[in-house]
Structures are given as structure tokens and as C-alpha cells.
Amino acid sequence: AKKTWFSANCFQCNLKNACLFIVLLILLGVLLYILYFYYGESYIVPHYKELLKLASIPLICIAFTYGHIALALWMTFWPTEFWPHPALQFKSGPFKGYGLGWQGIVPMKAIKMAQIAVDLMVPDVVRMEDVVARIDAARVTDIIRPALMEILKILIPRVAAKQTPI
């Protein structure tokens, strides 16, 4: 089955993660009970708003960090086409690829990265001499002959007329 982006990259609801979540909730409950029992009504009740503010700082930081990292990863690879419309993207000049919209960084640079990869890998993988040595001259001649004869029927009279004008 094909996984969605969320199920592949985020919290997955399975027995192991559910048990871990329950254990963490129990530990948090025990910690809060110990704090309340130790400090009692003398500190916690009058200052519960300040304590909630302090306790919310890590939660807000976690949510913000997770959200902005998820957005950065999404914007790196998606959308694959310029959004909202390709007509708003510069096609040439110093701002080529940029415009009033967004396209993922990897899709925008895909052609340039592919050219660099080919330039780096092809000389090590394939030598031109090997490619030429594998060509069957007789078969190439049989394939090209009909088209070549048609072209030569047109070219030979033109060249002859230029070389030997009457």
C-alpha cells in the first residue's frame, strides 16, 4: 500500500507508539502529583497561571520547530511545477527560474543538476571509442541509404550548377 507523506514522515499510530504515549502520560501525571504534594496549595494554586505559561514554552517551541521544518522540507521538493501559474515565472535573463510564485528548489534546479551529474559520470562510465566500435557500419548504411539517395538527388544538381555555370 502506498504511504501518504504524513504516515511516512510523522507519528504513526501503532501499538508500540500508543504504549509509549501512555507511559509518558503516566510519568507526567506522577511528576505533577509529586509537585502538587510537595508544594501543595502554598505555591501551585496562587501561581498556576505563571506555571502554565512556563510549561507551555517547550510545547510551543516543539510545535513551531516541527511546523517550520516540515514546511522547509515540503518547499524543497514541492511543488514540482511553478505555482500559481507558469506564466508568472521569468523564462530568461538574470532572474531565470524566479518570479511571482514558488517552485521547489530541487525541481527548479533538476536540469542543471542532471547536466552536472552526466558531465561527471559519463566520461568514467562510457568512452566514445567504445560507442563507435559497437556501431555496425553495414546496418547503418542500410538504414540511411533511402533518405541519403533522396537528399543526393536534390543536392548533386545544385552543386553541379554552382561549380560549372553555363
Image (cartoon, rainbow, N blue to C red):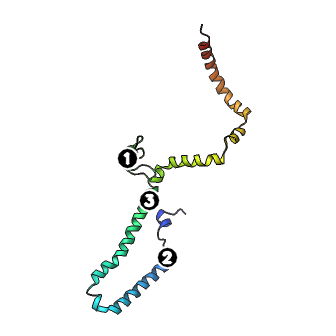
Which residue was labeled with disc 3? Answer: 74
Give how far across and how far down residue 49 sits, in percent: 27, 81
Q: Nearer the viewer, mark 3 or mark 1?
A: 1
| Amino acid at pointer 1 | Gly
Furthest toward the left, the residue is 46
Q: Foreground residue, 55 or 29? A: 55
Residue drawn 39% across the image and 51% down it: 102
Which residue: 34% across, 75% down?
57
Pinpoint residue 29: horizontal percent, then vertical percent: 40, 86
Amino acid under disc 3: Trp
| Residue in view at x 40 percent, y 87 percent | 31
Q: Which residue is mark 2?
A: 17
Label 3 vs label 2, nearer the camera: 3
Circle 1 is placed at which residue position?
Answer: 99
Q: How many numbered callouts?
A: 3
Say which quarter of the image contains residue 25: bottom left
Secondary element under disc 1, as helix, strand or loop, is loop
Dot 1, crowdedness within 10 Å: few (<14), some or many (≥20)? some
Residue 51 in percent (x, y) is at 31, 82
- Mark 3, secondary structure of its residue: helix
Residue 40 placement: quadrant: bottom left
Q: Are marks 1 and 2 in contact (CB under 8 Å)?
A: no
